[in-house]
Image (cartoon, grey):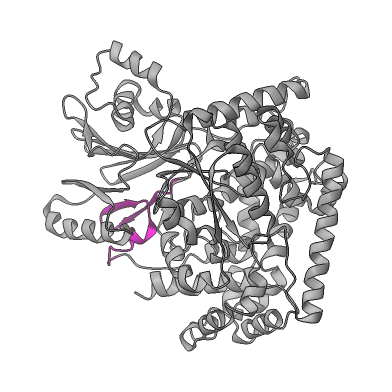
Amino acid sequence: MVDTEKEDEIGGLLESMCKSAKHENWYKVDQLISPPLAIKRLHLGVLNPETQPIFNEDKTLCIFMDGEVYDYQKERSNLESRGHRFEIGNDPEFVLHLYEEYGKEFVEKLNGLFTIAIWDVSNRKLLIANDRYGLEPLYYAKNSGRFLFASELKAILQDRSFKKEINDEAVAEFFAFDFVLENKTFFKGIDLLPPASILTYQDENLSVRQYWDIVFVEECDVRSEDYYVEKLAKLMKESTERRMKGNYRFGIFLSGGLDSRSILATIDKRHYPIHTFTFGTPECYDAKFGQMAANKAGTTHHFMELVPNYLASSARKGIWLNDGMANCFHFFNISMLEEAKKHFEIGFDGCGCDITIGGQSLVYFSGPRVYLSYKPLLPQDDDALAKVLYEAHTKAMFTDKMMSKLFSQAYYLKIKGAAFKSLKRTLSKSKAKLPANKVDYYAIRNVIRTWALGPIRARSQLEIRMIAFDNDLFDFYLTMPPELRLHRRIHTKALKKINPDLAKIPNTKTGIRSDAPILIGNVAFLVMYVIERLKRILARLTGIPMRRKRSYHMMDEWMRSELREWTENILLDENTLKRGHFNKGYVNQLIRDHMSGKKDYSRQLLALVTYEIFQRLFVDV
């Protein structure tokens, strides 16, 4: 949104914003420059490829849309009966007419993943809305009389008048949790649109309203386990079928776990041929069990070996794509995207199934002991629950003690306690009563949005569909008792009902048949857990790397060998050390302890690498 008198200046800014987010020359570009609005749409030319914006009949409204919506034939017929005319027949045209008919309530009727911008020409009002789960990022800022918004943060930074000021609270969260909570970014003044939000901007007034929230159904008659299995299997199949629409080539990112295998199980054979892609080390369970699942389903399977030094060539690109919001430790899928694009336009990703129907957040925050019990070991008191979550996060990243040594004394005093306060505040927003549901609420609103940065990287080459975030399936998940979600109890039985053959194939968590009784599966998990720990100890004592089947990577070992020089060159660079953010002596100690095999600090060191590359890409320029 801009001043009318500055059309030339804004045209140049819009072009710079577009250029910063145009990662491939073959991207398609649509635009509208009609002061006070100037907007461009970058897209792959796959979903809703028709030129945007799309106007209504009397040209009083227009829409730009990224993403897609499903199953609206009945509602479209209703709109046609009310006099709305459809000339193009795509998703954004439907959404625009829906807005005409229902106003801001239109978004509550949409099932899909999307970001929508509607311009009310006569009232000079901009409305931006996203889906329930906020999995397609939208960043926004007000600066120098302008309202800027973009799907990538770097685009907003093209406004050179924007003052780059680091958000210290976000930095504290990143090093404590491995991600940033809620709607924060690393820059003050640039926010991420929260999930299920409607943003309105008119006459320099900005408002954001939440139209939906995650509300667990906790006080109802618990049905039989068979009911939940039958219903879940049905809804999983329906979710996949909705996402098989369109004349596209489809593929699945197939691991050795149950999330992607559930997609494989629910795809109707009529949609074949299907390509499946697995990455990892040749000896890992993902490679073995992914191949077994592909063979059983009859897909065209591709295995991409994860080579030890892949980060040296791809970390910078991944950090640029993710706007510095994700630790490059997690960039495992980036090396396979160009190859995948040769075989399909739409890739299915299992992201989210583990936390929702799989109950994995309950396992993560309860610790290994939960495998000895059918109940998550979570405290009832909110303060105690926040401490459990905080300790689980920081144990994998930087504990308070480590952070006091990592940062310079002045900066640590500035951020001390900020991450815990943020987590506690975020956790308190849940309306749930059961601790397990509070944990899931927190994980879905925060952790999943970060995990979805993997699919976001993939969207630089492909369009991604995720079955876990289907409104009908998600609403049913909210009714499932936590004890049935735990240890994938219901998920596994639903998979067995849909495709017994795929359920027989082992999974990476246990190494045994996925449909094995829970007790046996838990014992197998604990045995594998102990074996993996022993292998790490032996590797440290002998200096000889031990192959680990359960993990698809060996990042700790790679950083001691192929990635060592790359890591040290970044972290020990003179320009890195003189920034004054971190304690030089402690960074050196982390590197020494890791490289000697004394500790595994691969995730922590790569968080430091990520933040430094972020500084170079986004702050120094």
522 in the magenta segment:
no
Q: Is residue 325 visible?
A: yes
25 vs 299, left or right, is left
Q: Looking at the image, which is closer to me, 228 or 548?
A: 548
Q: In the picture, residue 546 is in which quadrant?
A: bottom right
Q: Residue at x 63, y 47 (%)?
A: 443
| Spot occupied by residue 391 in the image (x, y as percentages of width and height) | 73, 59
284 vs 567, left or right, is right
| Spot occupied by residue 368 in the image (x, y as percentages of width and height) | 81, 53
| Spot occupied by residue 57 in the image (x, y as percentages of width and height) | 18, 24
Q: Residue at x 52, y 57 (%)?
A: 333
140 in the magenta segment:
yes
Q: Looking at the image, which is closer to me, 544 or 425?
A: 544
Q: In the picture, residue 224 is in which quadrant?
A: top right
Q: In the picture, residue 267 is in which quadrant?
A: top right
Q: Is residue 450 above or below residue 235?
A: below
Q: Is residue 9 above or below residue 195?
A: below
Q: Residue at x 16, y 60 (%)?
A: 9
Q: Is residue 13 above or below residue 599?
A: above
Q: Looking at the image, which is closer to me, 190 or 508?
A: 508
**What is the total number of numbered labels drawn onto the structure image?**
0
The magenta stretch is 136-161
| Spot occupied by residue 32 in the image (x, y as percentages of width and height) | 19, 45
Q: Can you name the residue that lies furthest to the top here?
A: 81
408 vs 459, left or right, is right
600 vs 19, left or right, is right
Q: Is residue 414 visible?
A: no
Q: Quadrant of the C terminus?
A: bottom left
